[in-house]
Amino acid sequence: ETPSSSLKEYENWDLFFTDTKIFNLINKINSHPRLFNLDVDILGAATVADAYEIKKFVKEEDGTHEGFRLINSGTIDPYQPLWGIRTCRYIKGGYLKPVVPKDKLQQYSKTRYQQSNSSKIVVASMTTRYEACLDIGGNYIAGKSTTIILGPLDKLYYCIGIINSKLASFWLNITFNSLKMSGEAINVGRNELGMLPIPVNQVDFMHIINKIIEERKDNLSSDTSKLESEIDRLVYQLYGLTEEEIKIIEES
C-alpha cells in the first residue's frame, strides 16, 4: 500500500502499478537529482517550422559544399550515428548521405547553426529504449523528432554513458509505461529525457566510450557488448544497486 500523500511527489503514476521490488528499485533510482538539474542544456533539435525550412536545404553529399551531416531518429544507434549507413527518412524524402550546407543554415538560423556546430549528444525519439549518439566537434545537424544535449565534454561523456545504459532504459520503460505506443515505443522528448535521475558523483566513461566508437567506426557489427557491460557495471555502482536489484534490471 502507498500513502496517498506520496502520489503528489510524482508527475507520472505508472510506478504505482508495479510490484514491490520494482517499486522500491525505481524509488531508489529516483533518489538522485534529475538530468534537468545537471550543468547541461536539453533542447528540442528542431521545431516543425524549422524542420520544413531545413528540408529545403537538404541534399546528398557531393563534395561541393561544406555541410552538416543530417541525422534523425532512424539513423541513431547507441553511441553511433548511422549517417551513410542507413537511409535517412526526412519529410517524404530519403537520403543516404544527407547534408545541410553550413552557409544556408547560418543564413536561416544562427541558433540552429551554433547548435549544429557544437559538441553534443543527439537522442532518438520513438524508441523502446534510450538511443543516444555523440557528436564531438559539431559535425551533425539533428533533424526533427530528436533531442539534443549541449554542455562541457566531460558532462556529455558522463551523460551518454548513463543514458545508453540498461538501468536508464529500465527506468524509462517503467516510469513512462502508459505512454507506450504500437511496438512498445515511447516518444522520448525533452521531458522523458530530462526527468532521468543522474547521480551527482561523476564517473569518467570517456575511455570506454571512445573504444566503442572506434571499434564500430569501420565495422558497425563489431561486438562491443563487453565494453557496454563494463559501463553498465559502473552505472550500477553509481546508483548503489544490490546484486538482487541488478538482476531485476538484467532480466527485464
Image (cartoon, rainbow, N blue to C red):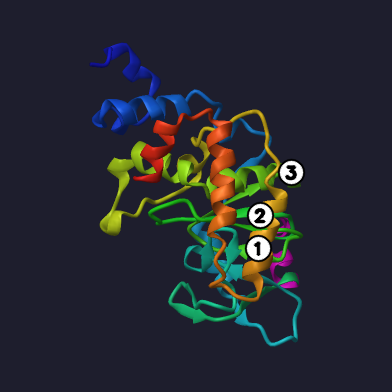
* Quadrant housing residue 108: bottom right
Q: Which residue appears at 36% of the width and 51% of the height?
A: 186
User: What span is colored magenta in the figure?
Assistant: 103-114
**Residue lying furthest front:** 243
20 part of magenta stretch: no
Does residue 198 appear anywhere in the picture?
no
219 or 193, nearer to the observer: 219
Mark 3 or mark 1, which is nearer to you? 1
Mark 3 surroundings: few (<14), some (14-19) or many (≥20) residues within 10 A:
few
Q: Which residue appears at 40% of the width and 30% of the height?
A: 26
Residue 209 bears which disc, if any?
2
- Cα separation, mark 3 vs mark 1, equals 16 Å
- Cα separation, mark 3 vs mark 2, equals 12 Å
Left or right of 224: which side holds 155?
A: right
51 or 133, nearer to the observer: 133
144 or 28, nearer to the observer: 28
Task: Tell me whether the residue at label 2 lies in contact with that at label 1, contact meaning CB atoms closer than 8 angstroms.
Answer: yes
- Kind of residue at disc 2: Ile
Residue 154 bears which disc, if any?
3
